[in-house]
Image: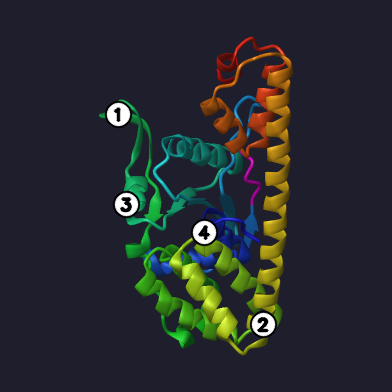
């Protein structure tokens, strides 16, 4: 199950491995047939230990003897370091599998999609050694699926379209209504799974609240199962956050005791900073430094 909108936007293509071809057929006018088989590739593209690189999802589609790899990247913001890695992904997979490679970037923000579409030119501008151009999709590139009958025929595509449009409340509201009806046409276990998948993929948006309300108000079995499981997970997440916050508070107090025992003055601003920190790893670093520091400034440097 995805833990964020970023993960959901590319993991839907692992849920239905032939979905990538249908998306390209419908929204990019790609002249490709449905594949006879699809393999989800290992996303670890690391060659040397100091340089670790992972693509989001990589799919190898096959049509008899013909093969084509699709790299599926989920991009929620303009991130230069990630974009700089895309040529490496393409070159690595092309070299390893000796077949064509297409980079597909999925964005729930149209500005990010425009940014992702810009060609990456490596080498002299007049004579580049490599040019990588992503096939990027934003909300304006993916038609919303707001008809229940259409959604029931292409449920994974409907989920994908909903995730792309998650920030456009009026549009996604109609899509969620259609998706809720469509899920009632498939088996309960699959419907419950996709309902959770959709909820996780919507992220902290108004769309997630709309989806939660739809599930609570519904009468289908999958909606009841979703509500029960969602509440249980919410309680578990709350307990985990509470436990982590309690541990952080204890670490912060231990750090202040160490500083006090070592007669290191702690001003009010620094005390507030320490007590407000809920990052256990950071608190651990500060505790290590407190054992040898001679001033509060040394703790934070």
Residue farthest to the left?
A: 126
The magenta stretch is 41-45
Q: Which residue is mark 4?
A: 9
Q: CA distance from mark 2 to mark 4?
A: 25 Å
Which mark is nearer the camera, 2 or 4?
2
Residue 44 located within the stretch drawn in magenta: yes
Sooner in the amino-acid sequence: mark 1 or mark 4: 4
Query: Separation of disc 1 and disc 4 at Cα?
Result: 35 Å
Asked whether, in this view, residue 80 is left or right of residue 111, the answer is right
Residue 94 location in percent, x, y? Answer: 53, 41
Q: Mark 4 and 3 residues: CB-CB less than 8 Å, in contact?
A: no
Q: Residue furthest bottom?
A: 219
Question: Disc 2 marks which residue?
Answer: 224
Counting residues from the start of the chain, the first of labels 2 and 4 encountered is: 4
Q: Residue at 59% x, 54% y: name it.
A: 60
The residue lying toward the viewer, choosing from 228 and 47, is 228
Is residue 142 within the magenta segment? no
Q: Are the residues flagged by discs 1 and 2 in contact, CB closer than 8 Å?
A: no
The x, y position of residue 57, in whole percent, is 57, 51
User: Are circles 1 and 4 on residues that touch, CB within 8 Å?
Assistant: no
Is 203 placed left or right of 221 in the picture? left
In the image, what residue occupies the spot 69% across and 79% down?
225
Crowd class of label 1 (few under 14; some 14 to 19; many from 20; radius 10 Å): few
Under tag 4, what secondary structure? helix
Q: Is residue 16 above or below residue 217?
A: above
- At horizontal 73% and vertical 49% (from top left) the residue drawn is 243
Q: Which residue position holds label 3?
A: 111
Tell which circle, 3 or 2, labels the residue nearer the N-terminal end. 3
1 and 3 marks in contact (CB < 8 Å): no
- State whether the magenta stretch is mostly helix, strand or loop: loop
Q: Which residue is mark 1?
A: 127
1 or 3: tag closer to the N-terminus: 3
């Amino acid at each position: 199950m995805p833990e964020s909108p970023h993960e959901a936007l590319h993991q839907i293509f692992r849920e239905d491995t032939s979905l990538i071809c249908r998306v390209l057929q419908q929204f990019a006018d790609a002249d490709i047939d449905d594949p006879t088989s699809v393999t989800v590739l290992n996303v670890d593209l690391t060659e040397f230990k100091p340089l670790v690189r992972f693509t989001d999802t990589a799919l190898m589609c096959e049509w008899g003897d013909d093969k084509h790899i699709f790299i599926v990247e989920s991009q929620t913001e303009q991130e230069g370091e990630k974009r700089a890695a895309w040529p490496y992904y393409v070159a690595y997979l092309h070299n390893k599998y000796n077949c064509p490679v297409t980079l597909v970037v999925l964005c729930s923000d149209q500005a990010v999609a425009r940014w992702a579409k810009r060609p990456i030119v490596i080498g002299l501008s007049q004579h580049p050694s490599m040019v990588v151009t992503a096939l990027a999709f934003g909300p304006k590139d993916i038609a919303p699926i707001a008809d229940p009958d259409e959604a029931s025929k292409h449920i994974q595509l409907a989920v994908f379209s909903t995730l792309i449009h998650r920030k456009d409340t009026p549009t996604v509201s109609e899509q969620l209504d259609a998706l809720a009806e469509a899920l009632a046409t498939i088996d309960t276990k699959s419907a419950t799974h996709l309902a959770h998948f959709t909820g996780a993929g919507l992220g902290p948006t108004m769309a997630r609240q709309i989806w939660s309300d739809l599930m609570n108000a519904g009468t289908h079995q999958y909606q009841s199962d979703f509500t029960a499981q969602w509440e249980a997970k919410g309680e578990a997440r709350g307990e985990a956050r509470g436990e982590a916050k309690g541990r952080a508070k204890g670490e912060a107090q231990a750090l202040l005791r160490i500083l006090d025992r070592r007669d290191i003055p702690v001003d009010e601003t620094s005390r507030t900073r320490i007590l407000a920190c809920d990052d256990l790893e950071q608190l651990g670093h500060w505790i290590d430094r407190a054992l040898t520091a001679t001033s509060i400034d040394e703790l934070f440097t």
